Image (cartoon, helix red, strand yellow):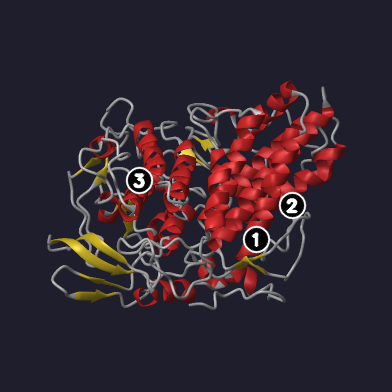
Amino acid sequence: MKISNKNILIQTVFTASLVLMNFGCKDKLDVGNPNAPTIDANVNTETGLISLAQGGVYINGFQEGDDWLGNSYFSLPWGYNELLADNVSADASNNQVATIGVPDYVIFDDGTKETNKAPSISILRTYNTRAATGAGNNATYYQWLNMYAMNNACNTVLSLVDNIPFSGDAASKIATVKAWCYWWKGYAYGSIGSMYYSGLILDEVGAKSSNYVLHDAILAKSDEYYNLAATTISGITSEGDYEAILGKLIPEFTQVGNGGVPTKEMWIRNINTMLARNLLVNKLSPFVNGNPAATITKSSTSVMTAADWNTVLTLSSKGIQKGDVVFTGRSTANNYFFSATGGTAASLTTGVNTSSTFKISERFVQNFKADDKRFTNNFSTATTYKNNFIFTTRYNIIDGGAGAAGVYVYGSKSVGAYELYIAGSYEENTLMMAEANIRLGNIAVGLGQIDLVRTYLGAGLAPVAGTGLTLAGAMTELVKERRVALIYRGLSFYDNRRWGRTYDITNGGGSYGNTVVTSAGVVNKNATINYNFLDYWDVPADESVLNPSTGAATMNPNF
């Protein structure tokens, strides 16, 4: 079941229609009058509400509207995240994927400079129009669409849940459904607040508002819902009814590997990880050209303080542990919310680089240390993709990996093989602890946590703890590991932003010491790249034009 959201405004005008979800609920749902479906008439049973709550997340949130490049939230919006992080490149014309990740200029090893004549900021703003959205060229549209559709779907479920007749311990079942909605509302607001300069707080079904608030307020609302979810979970008294409902809300085919039905304690640890993420990725912690004391002179956010680092450390210390169940996704042959071949940025990069939609970047590959088994198990040099700017690459992702036991696999196009991490993971949480410890002066502890992640992912590398690294050296290890461990998790751009790499060199940003291969085959090892990207995107025109702001600016004024 999904809630349709096809109106002119992405979210402020919402008309709900009820259709069956594709995850096997058809024979159980009381569909009422199929010629005049309404939420009230059709969702009046426990089974019907569960179907609505599941579809509002996995269809409205992760599939609805994402049928241009790939077929899910994890192929296009997350693809943009990897493009802006320079983990991948693209030459396809779809949705501006070939343009928004191109930096302003690059300076090669010999001092020559190549300039982009169509900078990313101008591309984003030129195509942030309603007409461009209709033509599939407005990159700002998709994440906003999916996350507000998810948010309003959860609002709808919350408006119904108290009036549904539940079997068993009704209070525990109702609380579980509410916690589900609070968790995903926290997720949606966190995604909006991490990507857009401003947004709307909409907590009632079909709510209308023109009171845009800055991204910090959106993130505060995300934190509020995550905390409400944790409080609600803690108050559930019937574990059996909790597990029964949650086991139906989470699609059965995703309950494998690291996915499944988390215990109450596990879910709360997932929440702590996401709270830590909200703080970490939305404040500056510059590490530019090997300098942990670098500063960015102009941005849309503030700098991490010692208090912030201590908060991240406290939250992540209570976050996801090794062996915890987390929220994952899997492809299926039919009736999927993402396909095996086109549903994730990982699958769109997997295979021969001359024919894959995304091409793995030389800047990503340079983060692997020598003898890292993750590299030898996942990347080949069978073909070279040549590009006239700086995106030539010698590397391909091996479909399904090369077969090394216990080594992480970066991409697969086989049905059900690739495990998509939708929210937090053990490795993300551990690396947040590591970074907080390093920044707080606990360098040996932080390095040990980096070692834990490398061991967990099968890297086979010698430990870095106890090697006497300085703050700069420890941060280098941390940055390299986050880059290679957390690709395709919807985090990479946010990391490069907070480390200062995406900002203009004149403002203290930029990326140094890069490997860049020219189309002529010249391998540069110390290239300087000036990305100069928007740090937080403008609100999409489909919202801002038809729903002008009476509050905060909808265009980022810092660029």
Query: Hey, what amino acid is under mark 3?
Result: Glu
Read off the residue under disc 3: 481
**Is 429 placed left or right of 173 in the picture?**
left
Depth order, front residue of 72/514: 514
Mark closer to the chain start, 3 or 1: 1
Mark toward the start of the polypeptide (2 vs 1): 2
- How far apart marks 3 and 1 lie (CA) works out to 29 Å
Q: Secondary structure at mark 2?
A: loop
Q: Residues within 10 Å of mark 3 (few under 14, many from 20)?
A: many
Q: Nearer the viewer, residue 128 or 29?
A: 128
Would residue 1 appear left or right of 284 to someone viewing this image?
right
Residue 192 falls in image quadrant: bottom right
Q: Amino acid at mark 2?
A: Ala
Asked whether 418 or 352 is in front, the reply is 418
In the displayed structure, 467 sits above or below 402; it is below
Element carrying mark 1: helix
What residue is disc 1 on?
218
Residue type at numbered disc 1: Ile
Q: Which numbered mark, 3 or 1, is in the foreground of this view? A: 3
Task: Give percent across and percent down for residue 123.
Answer: 42, 73
Q: Earlier in the sequence, mark 2 or mark 3?
A: 2
Q: Which residue is mark 2?
A: 16
Q: Are marks 2 and 1 in contact (CB under 8 Å)?
A: no
* Residue 37 seen in render: no
Q: Secondary structure at mark 3?
A: helix
What crowding class fits label 1: few (fewer than 14 Cα within 10 Å), some (14-19), or many (20 or more)? many
Asked if 194 appears above or below 434 in the picture, the reply is below
User: Residue at (61%, 41%) from the top-left corner?
Assistant: 271
Give the image location of residue 327, x and y in percent: 55, 36
Rendered position, 226 above or below 168: below
Give residue 19's position: percent from left, percent from top.
69, 43
